Amino acid sequence: MSSNIVYKEYAKKTAIAIIAALLNAIGMNFFLIPAQVYAAGLNGVAQLGSDMLRDSMNISISTGILVLLLNIPVAILGWLKVGKSFTVFSFLTVAFMSFFLIVIPEVQVSNDILLNAIFGALIASVGIGLALKFGISTGGLDIVAMYITIKTGRSFGKYFLLLNGVIIIVAGFAYDWTFALYTLISLYVQSRVIDIIHTRHQKLTVMIMTQHADTVIQAIHDNMVRGITVVDAMGGYSKEDVAMLIMVITRYELYDITHIVEEFDSKAFINVMETSSVFGDFRSEADQKLAMAMYKNKVM
């Protein structure tokens, strides 16, 4: 890609990071925090930690500060083990989120805990889903999820549920089980909204219909090492010959794939399906990076 395209891509991702951070901060400061309903992941840990430090030790630390502090070791892990670009934009989102959490005042929009739980999760999850859709994240457990996937090839889902379960239990014992149960509702709403905006399934099957198969395949292989099955097909209406490219990717590669294909064939048709299981030779992210490095050394 030319430097202008790269700069435009970086500018777009930076803008998305700011929007995602702002939506998360609004969801927390206007709805979740005033109602004492806890967010998911490290944001929830920071929120719960801020409440417990204030109530048990009379120490006042902003949730925004704790969000930033908790994400520093996660960012170091991501930088060393996951990928620099993904980690930089994710931590950028965290930094903006921390800033917005500090400067935006906590305002209780409604006295109804249920409404706070639903709308807080709704607004925050729009930010999370938007970030994922553009190939970045809101930091925290997404980076940890990437690392666990790289090391084990397993889904992070059960660990994510375990941590959120701990948040709910601690909140229940420390404060009131009513708030803990509303937190559970909030987490459910968040997961459903994120699923609508951006799939959270670990593996996806992508089918690309294109009349420029060689160009698209080369562009994909220049950016990632994924096996591609080519099937000769014909358009039912146009009667024109097309190639159907079939490949299995991870959810974090979806943005890159669609961006690459649209750049080299704007008329290509892309169908994305969730994949429950993959058997056989499927490269993990770690294998992918190694294979990509070997490929680049070979062609240079």
Image (cartoon, rainbow, N blue to C red):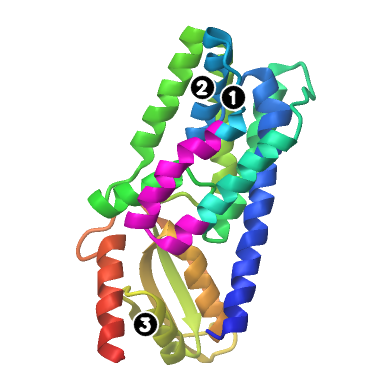
Residue 30: x %, y % from top left: 74, 29
**Image position of 250 (left or right of 238):** left
State whether the magenta stretch is mostly helix, strand or loop.
Answer: helix
* Residue ID for mark 1: 61
Q: Nearer the viewer, mark 1 or mark 2?
A: 1
Q: Is residue 276 above or below residue 272?
A: above
Tell me what residue is drawn at x 39 percent, y 49 percent. 76
Q: Are marks 1 and 2 in contact (CB under 8 Å)?
A: yes
* Residue ID for mark 3: 231
Q: Is residue 204 above or below residue 137?
A: below
**Image position of 230 (left or right of 69):** left
Disc nearer the start of the sequence (1/2)? 2
* Residue ID for mark 2: 49
Tell me what residue is drawn at x 52 percent, y 60 percent. 135
Disc nearer the start of the sequence (1/3)? 1
Q: Amino acid at mark 1?
A: Ile
Q: Amino acid at mark 3?
A: Val
Q: Is residue 276 above or below residue 106?
A: below
From this viewpoint, is residue 67 visible? yes
**Image position of 278 (left or right of 190):** left
> What are the residue bounds of the magenta stretch?
66-88
